Amino acid sequence: AVQRLVHVHELANCAEKLGCAETMRELVPLLMPISCDPELSVRQALAEQLVRFAKVLLAEPDVKCEYHDGEATAYEVVVTRIVSVLSGLLANNSAQDMPPNSGSQVLDAASEALVGVATLLPADAVGQTVLTAVLRLAHDNDAEENRVVATQLLGSLAPVITSELCCQFVLPEIVSLADDPVFRVRKAAALKVGSLSAVLGEELSASRLLPVYETLARDEIWGVRKACVESLAKLAEVLPLEVRSSKLIPLLHEFYDDGSRWVRVAACQALGPFIATLPSEAISAEFLQLFTSLSNPSNPSASDSDIAYYCAYNLPAVAQAVTAKRWPELAEAFRTLASNTQWKVRR
């Protein structure tokens, strides 16, 4: 196993030295057998090599090679064989009968590689190849891990594919997966709402994505609600001001008072970045007080040791948002943070 692992780690280096034609003839036939290796470490190493491997092939996309199933160009090898290998790694390592977390490193490596390969391809080609493979995972009703991985990948692929494909396929899938009975799928959807909104734009985010986000923000599972908090600032950057004021500010108050400590801590961390997306006139004195109170160690919400650090870290952005005229509202928090016992807060 160690010998196989060493050889796989040299796969991309070898391809770069051989060039496209030799790589297609000598190395491409090895990809599928390696992807079925019984050792997780070998499969993970393969996934980590495939983006560089694909770059070698795409440097000369028209080079042809004869295989047992017919002739193929270097480009066709990438969009069929390499994408298939990565899709197989994703599906096989998320099998329900595997020990918990045993294949997580393979999944992470294969997911990262699939997105990396997608960035090398034309946007319209990604829809026909990579996106199709991810949609198959999303529709796997038997393996919840496949749906979790697919949700994560859909969010990552959104900036890579065309806006038309994103609206036609990615958005409806995320909306559907956000209603999945398995909370881990809903959590994955909540985490991708922010990045997806940046691609969809203001109108679609407000009309299609915001209702889904509001439902997830009140999910019965605290992990899903926490994921919503983590997406809040990115979503706020896209939505129009009136929606941020009327919808997101009340939601943030709910997060701040949530029954789960972890959601409350996440809300404290997200408060500064969210306020920074608002103009001064939309930031009420009461809302700003929520932020400045995080500097006070006696505040129950600031009991977590890192809350004061997040308050200090975000203070410049909040000060810029409220403008110099409202510095007196921040001055006391600044003085408190400057005398904090933690050196990282003072710094």
Image (spheres, rainbow, N blue to C red):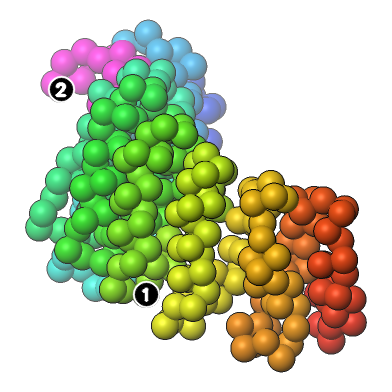
Is 212 situated above or below 157? below
The residue range painted magenta reads 65-81
Residue mark closest to the camera, 2 vs 1: 1
Q: Is residue 329 left or right of residue 8?
A: right
Of labels 2 and 1, earlier in sequence is 2
The N terminus: image quadrant: bottom left
Classify 185 as above or below 221: above
- Of residues 100 and 57, which is closer to you in this image? 100
Q: Is residue 135 left or right of residue 336?
A: left
Q: Amino acid at mark 1?
A: Trp
Q: Residue at x 26, y 67 (%)?
A: 183
| Residue found at x 35% / y 44% | 209
Image mark for residue 222: 1
| Label 2: which secondary element | loop
* Mark seen at residue 308: none
- Residue 310 at what x, y percent from top left? 70, 69
Q: Is residue 79 magenta?
A: yes
Which quarter of the image is occupied by the C terminus? Answer: bottom right
Q: Is residue 15 magenta?
A: no
Q: Amino acid at mark 2?
A: His
Q: Secondary structure at mark 1?
A: helix
